[in-house]
C-alpha cells in the first residue's frame, strides 16, 4: 500500500471520527433546548466534518504534511510481540509495587494522624 493511499485512508478515518464527535456534540447542545429530530445531529456532524475534511484534503500544505507523516511512520521500527508482552508485564508489576507502597504509606499515615488527633 503506497503512502498516498495511507494518507487518503487517514483523512477518511479522521473525518469519520470527527463526524461522530460533532454529531454527539450537536445532539448534546441541541438536547439542552429541545429533543432534536432523528438523524439531524448526525447529519449536521457528517456535513460539517465532511466539508472540513474535504477542505483539509484539498489544501496542498495539509496534504503534504500528512504525506510526510506517513513517510516518517514507514521508517519507525515497531516493537516485536515479545517486547510488547514484556513491556506490559513490567508496567503491571511496577503499578502493583507502587500501589502496595502507597497503601503501606497510607496505613502508616492514617495510624499516625489517628494517634495524634484521636
Image (cartoon, rainbow, N blue to C red):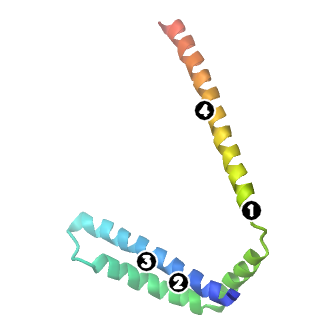
State if disc 3 and disc 1 touch (CB < 8 Å). Answer: no
CA distance for labels 3 and 2? 10 Å
Kindly identify which numbered label has been placed on residue 99: 4
- Of the numbered discs 1 and 3, the one sitting upstream in the chain is 3
Q: Position of residue 110 (x, y in %)?
A: 53, 17
Which quadrant of the figure has residue 67?
bottom right
Mark 4–mark 1 Cα distance, whole angstroms, equals 29 Å
Q: Nearer the viewer, mark 4 or mark 3?
A: 4
In the image, residue 96 above or below residue 69: above
- Foreground: disc 3 or disc 2: 2
Residue lying at the far front in this picture: please name it: 82
Give how far apart the Cα atoms at labels 1 and 2 are.
28 Å
The residue carrying mark 2 is: 12
Q: Which residue is mark 3?
A: 19
Residue at the spot x=41%, y=73% of the render?
A: 20
* Label 3 Cα crowd, 10 Å radius (few <14 / some 14-19 / many 20+): many
What residue do we see at 48% from left, 74% from top?
A: 17
Q: Give the mark nearer the N terminus: 4 vs 1.
A: 1
State left or right for residue 89 relative to residue 72: left
Q: How many marks?
A: 4
Secondary element at image label 4: helix
Dot placed on the residue nearer the N-terminal end, 1 or 2? 2
Q: Residue at x 65, y 92 (%)?
A: 60
Mark toward the start of the polypeptide (4 vs 3): 3
**Of the image marks 3 and 2, the number of the one nearer the N terminus:** 2
Which callout, 1 or 2, points to the residue nearer the camera? 1
Q: Are marks 1 and 2 in contact (CB under 8 Å)?
A: no
> Residue at label 1?
80
Q: Seen in the image, is 38 located left or right of residue 64?
A: left
Vertical placement of 50 versus 98: above or below? below
Amino acid at each position: 500500500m503506497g503512502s498516498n493511499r495511507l494518507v487518503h485512508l487517514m483523512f477518511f478515518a479522521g473525518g469519520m471520527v470527527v463526524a461522530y464527535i460533532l454529531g454527539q456534540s450537536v445532539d448534546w447542545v441541541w438536547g439542552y433546548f429541545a429533543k432534536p429530530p432523528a438523524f439531524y445531529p448526525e447529519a449536521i456532524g457528517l456535513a460539517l466534518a465532511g466539508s472540513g475534511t474535504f477542505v483539509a484534503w484539498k489544501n496542498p500544505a495539509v496534504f503534504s504534511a500528512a504525506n510526510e507523516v506517513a513517510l516518517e511512520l514507514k521508517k519507525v521500527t515497531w516493537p516485536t510481540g515479545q517486547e510488547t508482552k514484556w513491556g506490559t508485564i513490567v508496567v503491571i508489576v511496577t503499578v502493583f509495587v507502587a500501589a502496595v507502597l502507597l497503601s503501606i504509606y497510607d496505613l502508616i499515615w492514617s495510624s499516625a494522624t489517628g494517634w495524634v488527633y484521636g
